[in-house]
Image (cartoon, rainbow, N blue to C red):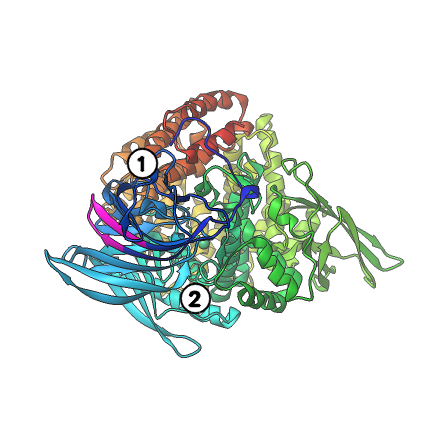
């Protein structure tokens, strides 16, 4: 941590490592405060020059160094630079280092730390240097063995990567297990776990007939909540064989659930470590969204075994090589396991809410950034979700079979290596008749969301339809930015709603005409079907034509999209009315169209529930040069109230028509629960608390968490008379389950009324809250910043001050969590001047703080710009 601007790391300055570690044998003597680490490495020089060996190391107490078995003294250990320099070393040698670490004091949750009573690790991207001195970069791939020594009673389970090859008892009540990972890997994939854990076991037979042992570990007592994760794992293994021909390569696959975890999960070779939120679930305590998320994250980490582990990144600028590709793979998996159209709509909603906002703001970066200060700040929606869209475009351009050929080629050429995004593109190209990706590569290096305009002309006499596509680069794109090569999936629909043409157009120029011949009547164009390119689309369609698409488009994404386009436009106009203090009125054709969707029995429940979504505040804020926080919220409320009031009978009928005799987890049942809860929520907007008791009854009668928390959210956000009673009942019932308490905190932190600020101060003191657990901080403060725009941007400035205070406290413990909170200030430049004047001093106070982490420094300096 330092006060002056941290060093900027540049992709252009990449140099291969001077030394490579061939093998590393570790012995760890686990102890809460004094863990002894003994490392024996075979090291080889990797350059022609004779250079010093520089090892990374952070927060390590150096005990001894031996080179080829002799005590070595010609070194400099700089705790400030986090390095250990060995001035003179031979071309090939064995290095033995002993150092000590303090896992209990490690609240960064990076390296080796304790989550409750469990020892665990998180080493991506640069955590291993907090365990021992090492060439800690992904292009240094070594074979690892690990001997773990620990107290047998406290830590009966000792795990690391690969296969267990020895175990035994030692004196003093200790025991050991030795693990060997036969695959070379970068240190970021190294993992260790020790604890008194519960476990469930299963097996998977691979396509070549090998039996793989599957084990999921958790806190004792939670074993029954691991079954969905286990089912998801088996489905993932089967899916990767079926879709990509990829078979698992070790005899054992382990997953461990821990409560203290910075991110979602980690793909360590053979030993995934997960945030317990992405493992533990049962009907009573987890929502359908949780179940869905578990399946997808279990899949994600499993798929990394090939896209990430077998082929890894040369350097961290290549992060999207593994993350974008693996998100694409997990999205495809979810689509195949559930409903493809629902999955696509949800992914795009997520992309818009998080990635589009990021890409338009101060931390906007290309999926392959050219520079960073702190790599942990680049585990972003852009690297992950936009990265996945870029992979999806490649598949759209090559076709599913062509893409598969490209994947096969990628493994054929690069298995076992640490490579670049260019290498992936190369494989895709050579497997597909040297497909030309030259212009497509612009997606990797340019930031900002492109704008796409579609206009059309119909020549009745010539029976010719011309679609003109124009791409514009956004204002924040680089000066020398070039046009994109983008696949635009288009359909033409006749007046009866039938598709008369459907194809993928390849836009390469700034403006291009696409001509359709033999079109006998004027069609409506449905553009960017399936959201084939991650752009902001505008069209020349009239309001009535949008309503037509909303009812008739064969592409379910664009049917959903038409409703979003229409409601976004109406809401933005109403916000202008609100700002000018004009009276509002909601377009009656829209109210009517909304009612038609509700009443249409041919639409399935999941899609109907999605179609009822009113564009989120964050998405609406993106469209405003100066963000009108209270007006945006007021208009959204007004729209919901108008729709609810107009259609209350239909909503009640719909609500009552859905009866679930037994709890099932299939897409149909999940869609039904979503729809039911959406109806309930909308009804809560009807004047006078008319449906308060309906919501409270729903709450009391709930037999699963989806209904229980759905109703609670409605009750709290509507400020119903039952609010306090419901919150208390929920607390009393669930106070011992931290994952459920996280939901309880979130519901309250996101309530947009004035009392929320005081509620947060009180909740921070509650026994269920613990600021060293990232999930709890995210549930309370993270939710407040991200979803409670009105209260965070309170005219008194108290929201800014609270978050700045907490962020600075947290930065001393866990810079990664602090820096995520810091990005909550990212709309600074677009907040009204009076609010900017309150926000600026807080941002300045943060950046001037002594010992600020580079994580927070990088984000806040970009926001202040
Ligand atoms: N590779 C992990 C995943 O996407 C994420 C790990 C990120 N960890 C971090 N500390 N930034 O599955
Ligand atoms: Zn990942």
Image quadrant, ligand 2: bottom left
* Residue farthest toward the bottom in the current orientation of the protein: 209
Crowding at dot 1, Cα within 10 Å, few <14 / some 14-19 / many 20+, comes out as: some
Mark 1: secondary structure = helix
CA gap, disc 2 and disc 1: 36 Å
Viewer-nearest of discs 2 and 1: 1
Residue 70, percent across and down?
Answer: 27, 50
Q: Residue at (22%, 47%) from the top-left corner?
A: 35
Q: Where the C terminus falls, by quadrant?
A: top right
Which of these two is toward me, 145 or 246? 145
Q: Is residue 613 visible?
A: no
The earlier-in-sequence mark between 2 and 1 is: 2
Which of these two is toward me, 319 or 461? 319
Classify residue 406 as left or right of residue 378.
right
Classify residue 777 as left or right of residue 444.
left
* Residue farthest toward the left in the current orientation of the protein: 172
Q: Residue at (59%, 33%) from the top-left corner?
A: 624
Residue wearing tag 1: 813
Classify residue 702 as left or right of residue 676.
left
Secondary structure mostly taken by the magenta-highlighted segment of the chain: strand
Residue 66, percent across and down?
Answer: 28, 49
Residue 31 lies in the magenta-colored region: yes
Residue wearing tag 2: 236
Residue 606 lies in the magenta-colored region: no
Mark 2: secondary structure = helix
Residue 715, percent across and down?
Answer: 36, 43
> Exactly how many numbered labels are in the figure?
2
| 791 shown above or below 344 | above
Crowding at dot 2, Cα within 10 Å, few <14 / some 14-19 / many 20+, comes out as: many
Residue 670, percent across and down?
Answer: 43, 60
Which region is colored magenta? 27-40
Q: Is residue 163 visible?
A: yes
């Amino acid at each position: 941590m330092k006060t002056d601007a941290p060093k900027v790391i540049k992709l252009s300055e990449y140099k291969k490592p001077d030394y490579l570690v061939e093998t590393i044998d570790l012995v760890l003597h686990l102890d809460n405060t004094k863990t002894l680490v003994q490392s024996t490495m075979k090291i080889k020089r990797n350059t022609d020059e004779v250079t010093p060996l520089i090892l990374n190391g952070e927060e390590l107490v150096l005990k001894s160094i031996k080179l080829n078995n002799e005590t070595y003294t010609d070194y400099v250990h700089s705790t400030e630079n986090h390095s250990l320099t060995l001035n003179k070393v031979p071309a090939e040698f064995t290095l033995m280092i002993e150092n000590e670490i303090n896992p209990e004091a490690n609240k960064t949750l990076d390296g080796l730390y304790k989550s409750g009573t469990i020892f665990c690790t998180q080493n991506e991207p640069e955590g291993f240097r907090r365990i021992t001195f090492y060439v800690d970069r992904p292009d240094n791939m070594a074979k690892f063995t690990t001997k773990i020594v620990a107290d047998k009673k406290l830590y009966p389970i000792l795990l690391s990567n690969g296969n267990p090859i020895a175990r035994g008892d030692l004196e003093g009540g200790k025991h050991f297990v030795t693990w060997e990972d036969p695959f070379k890997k970068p240190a970021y994939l190294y993992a260790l776990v020790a604890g008194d854990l519960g476990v469930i076991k299963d097996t998977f037979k691979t396509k070549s007939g090998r039996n793989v042992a599957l084990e999921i570990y958790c806190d004792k007592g939670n074993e029954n909540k691991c079954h969905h994760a286990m089912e998801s794992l088996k489905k993932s293994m089967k899916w990767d064989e079926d879709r990509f021909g990829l078979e698992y390569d070790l005899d054992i696959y382990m997953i461990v659930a821990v409560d203290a975890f910075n991110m979602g999960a980690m793909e360590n070779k053979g030993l995934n470590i997960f945030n317990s939120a992405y493992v533990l679930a049962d009907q009573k305590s987890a929502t359908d969204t949780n179940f869905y998320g578990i399946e997808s994250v279990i899949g994600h980490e499993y798929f990394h075994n090939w896209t990430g582990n077998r082929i890894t990144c040369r350097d961290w600028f290549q992060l999207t090589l593994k993350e974008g590709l693996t998100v694409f793979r997990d999205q495809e998996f979810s689509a195949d396991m559930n409903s493809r159209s629902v999955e696509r709509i949800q992914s795009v909603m997520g992309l818009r809410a998080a990635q589009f906002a990021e890409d338009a703001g101060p931390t906007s970066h290309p999926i392959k950034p050219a520079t960073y200060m702190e790599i942990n700040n680049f585990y972003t929606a852009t690297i992950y979700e936009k990265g996945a869209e870029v992979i999806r475009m490649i598949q759209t351009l090559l076709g599913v079979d062509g893409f598969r050929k490209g994947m096969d080629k990628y493994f054929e050429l690069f298995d076992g290596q640490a490579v670049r995004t260019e290498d992936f593109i190369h494989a895709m190209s050579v497997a597909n008749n040297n497909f030309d990706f030259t212009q497509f590569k612009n997606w990797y290096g340019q930031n900002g969301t492109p704008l796409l305009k579609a206009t059309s002309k119909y020549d009745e006499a010539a029976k010719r339809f011309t679609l003109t596509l124009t791409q514009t680069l956004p204002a924040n794109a680089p000066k020398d930015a070039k046009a994109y090569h983008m696949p635009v999936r288009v359909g033409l629909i006749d007046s009866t709603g039938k598709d008369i043409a459907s194809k993928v157009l390849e836009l390469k120029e700034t403006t291009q005409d696409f001509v359709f011949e033999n079109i006998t009547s004027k069609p409506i164009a449905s553009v960017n079907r399936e959201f084939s390119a991650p752009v902001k689309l505008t069209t020349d369609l009239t309001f009535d034509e949008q309503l037509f698409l909303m009812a008739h488009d064969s592409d379910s994404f664009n049917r959903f999209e038409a409703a979003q386009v229409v409601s976004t436009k109406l809401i933005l106009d109403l916000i202008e009315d609100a700002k000018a203090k004009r009276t509002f009125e909601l377009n009656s054709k829209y109210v009517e169209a909304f009612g038609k969707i509700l009443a249409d029995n041919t639409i399935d429940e999941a899609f109907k529930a999605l179609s009822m979504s009113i564009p989120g505040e964050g998405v609406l804020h993106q469209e405003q040069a100066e963000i009108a926080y209270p007006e945006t919220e007021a208009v959204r409320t007004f729209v919901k109230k108008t729709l609810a009031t107009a259609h209350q009978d239909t909503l009640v009928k719909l609500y009552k028509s859905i009866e679930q005799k037994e709890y099932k987890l299939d897409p149909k049942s999940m869609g039904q629960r979503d729809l039911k809860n959406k109806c309930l929520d909308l009804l809560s907007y009807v004047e006078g608390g008319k449906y308060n008791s309906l919501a409270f009854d729903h709450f009391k009668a709930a037999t699963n968490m989806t209904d229980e928390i759905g109703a609670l959210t409605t009750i709290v956000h509507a400020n119903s008379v039952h609010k306090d009673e419901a919150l208390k009942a929920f607390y009393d019932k669930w106070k011992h389950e931290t994952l459920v308490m996280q939901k309880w905190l979130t519901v309250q932190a996101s309530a947009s009324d004035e009392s929320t600020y005081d509620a947060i101060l009180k909740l921070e003191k509650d026994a269920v809250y613990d600021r060293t657990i990232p999930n709890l901080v995210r549930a309370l403060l993270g939710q407040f910043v991200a979803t409670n725009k009105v209260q965070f941007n309170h005219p008194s400035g108290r929201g800014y001050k609270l978050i700045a205070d907490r962020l600075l406290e947290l930065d001393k413990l866990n810079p990664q969590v602090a820096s995520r909170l810091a990005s909550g200030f990212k709309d600074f430049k677009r907040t009204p001047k009076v609010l900017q004047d309150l926000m600026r001093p807080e941002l300045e106070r943060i950046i001037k703080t002594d010992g600020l982490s580079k994580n927070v420094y990088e984000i806040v300096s970009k926001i202040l710009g």
